[in-house]
Image (spheres, rainbow, N blue to C red):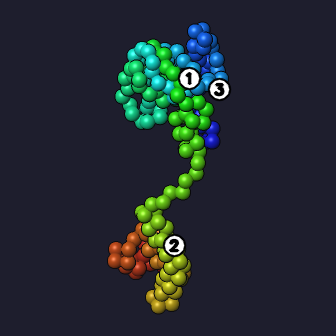
Amino acid sequence: MIDKLNLLSKEKITVIRSSREQKITPEEIVMNDILKISAGEQIPSDAVVIEGVAEANEAMLTGESDLVLKEKGAILLSGSFLASGNILAEVSHVGADNYASKLMVEAKTHKPINSKILNSLDRIASFTSKIIIPFGLALFFEALLIKMLPTNLAVIYTSTPLLGYASERNRPPYNHFITDCGN
């Protein structure tokens, strides 16, 4: 699922080259192109505002839910959207150097989780898995051989603490089980 992550749309955008407006695909953007971006459009490449005022929605990139005011000299991050206004902006990064591209590569890179809590839980689980079978056998043979319980009650006696449903102290007396089971 994360391999299909793409923050940038493929819609054509307006650039100004040689004093003429042109519609091009985002892949055709080159350094120092002048982008003409209006409200509702996605910023296709990192750029610096050279004219106009707008508000950008950078929530998808930064998590910031408030609109960010963009005036002359402000940096526009690729992948964000203009919520209002019209601007002209000069491209400062293209392709893999764009903020959105770097973010996508980082998200797609598998990073092992290194957490003290998870490491502690792994050690506890490892220890518990090593002692559970001997502990269960000891309980079963205690019920069967020492307490002389029938096999079906010995299984209940063994499984109850292993499954964590009742502790040794909270378990009702087994003669109560015998009368309830009809034995």
Q: Is residue 10 above or below residue 61?
A: above
User: Residue at position x 49%, y 20% from top?
Assistant: 89
Could you tell me which secondary element the residue under label 3 belongs to?
helix
The spot of residue 67 in percent (x, y) is 38, 25
User: Residue at position x 51%, y 90% from top?
Assistant: 145
**What is the C-alpha distance between the residues marked 2 and 3?**
51 Å
The spot of residue 56 in percent (x, y) is 42, 24
Q: Is residue 39 at least partly visible in the picture? A: no
Identify the residue position indicated by label 2 in the image.
Answer: 126
Identify the residue position indicated by label 3 in the image.
Answer: 27
Front residue of 105 and 121? 105
Disc 2 crowd, CA 10 A, few/some/many (<14, 14-19, 20+): few
User: Which is nearer the N-term, disc 3 or disc 1?
Assistant: 3
Nearer to us: label 2 or label 3: 3
User: Residue at position x 62%, y 23% from top?
Assistant: 29
Nearer to us: label 1 or label 2: 1
Front residue of 32 and 60? 32
